[in-house]
Amino acid sequence: MDIIQSDYISAFGGINFVFEYLDKNRIGDFITEHLPGLSPQSQYTWKDLFYSLFSIYLCGGDCIEDLQTHLKSHFMNNPFVRIPSPDTVLRRLIQLSGDNQQCQTKRGKVTHQFNANTRLNRLMISLLKKWGAFDGDERILDYDNTIIFNEKSDSKMSYKRDYGYQPGVCVLNEEQILYVENRNGNSDAKSFQADTLTRLFDLLEEQKVLPIEHFRADAASYQYDVVTLLEKHVNHFYIGCRNSYVESYFTKISDWQTIKDSTGEDMEIGEIPITPFIRQARKQNKAPRAYRLVVKRKRSKDQQMNMFTQDAYEYRAILTNNTKLSAVEVARFYNHRGNMERQFDILKNDFGWNHMPFSIIPHNTVFLCLTALCRNLYGQIITYFAERVKGLKPTFRIKKFWFRFIILPAKWIKRSRKQQLRIYGRLNFSP
């Protein structure tokens, strides 16, 4: 086989169209305005650092070292970005980190570690506001925690019996990452959740995007302090309940409505008004409030009798203050929070959360926030290009976008005193 060598050609020519789109929307300038100033002698700007981090995942990489190992040679003479070394990127990210908060519960002996990077979360919310993410008729927030298993120097044992972190994440309208707060693996989702949500709502109030129409969370949010906080900042909330807290109400429900669940099986929905947290409210000299308890039940597959309800059903309950929706509508609306697991899968496998580069929580929190920002921008990017490039859909994960658009042989040439992008192949792109 005869080989004829030619000038170096980049394999990732499609990323130049992404950079051009980001520049048209002044994303680099917007990020620079929200981050600390750099010295005039700095060789790389915040735009260079962010574009470099983003390009790792747009080009199929999964760790910071891929910049030097695989990507840097593909960005030679690129007019949009200068690629720094991985060490430079990591050193600059460390400059954005903040201190941990340590605290203990009243009766517990475990030291909880939290890291809330207010600067980067403010940047994330501000950028969503710039894109118009809060302009819809209804703003829906979902809050949940996920475990990122790792063996970092400061990671603690989680309830899954393995070491890791357990960050709390809030998602806007089931698609955009709104807020990220890191916590160590031994800090369960229930501990100090009201403090986490307070910090979130303070940022939303600062950005003037309150109130929120709907808020959904799992049973870790079934706390008096959390429910009281939600009463102030959201119009309607939907909180999962542990059966041990509310199972005494199940037998009092007499009216059950049968529907089909997502798998086609029969499921029954009922409801009952309850007044929870009576003791906690009285301690604060406040009148207890009544809410709706919407209950779902299905026949247990093993037909095992429930000793509390004396029947063979599996029960799930939702506490809500929404009096407009029917019980069936509440149940179906709450089921949509299952989309949180999809978001966690995207963050871990598409945007590097499974490959955190640092050894301690404060530094890794910076990485989690910036990659969450990349995830939000990718949602805008794939939507934009899906309307203009044949074969792309707005639901594509980043791997399909990489194969179908980013991988495009191209090189920059200088002609008539300006740089032009020469691509080798066909691109059905309508700017």
Image (spheres, rainbow, N blue to C red):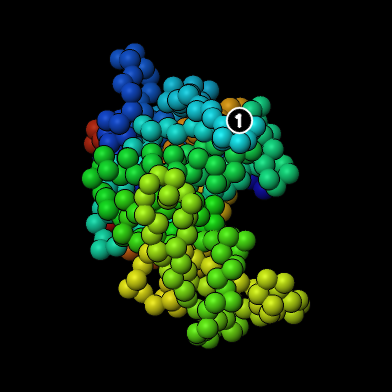
Residue at 27%, 36% (x, y): give it: 30
Image check: 80 left or right of 367? left
Q: Where is residue 426 in the image (x, y as percent from the top left)?
A: 41, 59
Residue 326 visible in the current orientation: yes
Name above or below for residue 383 compared with residue 311.
above
Q: How many marks?
A: 1
Residue 427 visible in the current orientation: no
Q: Position of residue 122 (x, y in %)?
A: 33, 37
Give the class, few, some or many, for how many residues have Cα within 10 Å of label 1's Cα (few <14, many ≥20): some
Name above or below for residue 197 compared with residue 341.
above
Picture quadrant where residue 288 is located: bottom left
Is the C terminus in the top left, top right, bottom left or bottom right quadrant?
Answer: bottom left
Image check: 390 left or right of 399? left
Q: Where is residue 62 in the image (x, y as percent from the top left)?
A: 57, 41
Image check: 147 left or right of 272? right
Give 118 or 383, whichever is nearer the viewer.
118
Residue at 35%, 61% (x, y): give it: 236
Name above or below for residue 174 compared with residue 17.
below
Residue at 47%, 75% (x, y): give it: 271
Give 418 or 211, whichever is nearer the viewer.
211
Q: Where is residue 51 in the image (x, y as percent from the top left)?
A: 40, 36
Reading the image, the residue beneath label 1 is 111
Q: What element carries label 1?
A: loop
Q: Which amino acid does label 1 sit on?
A: Thr
Residue at 45%, 34% (x, y): give it: 116
Give 28 or 320, whichever is nearer the viewer.
320
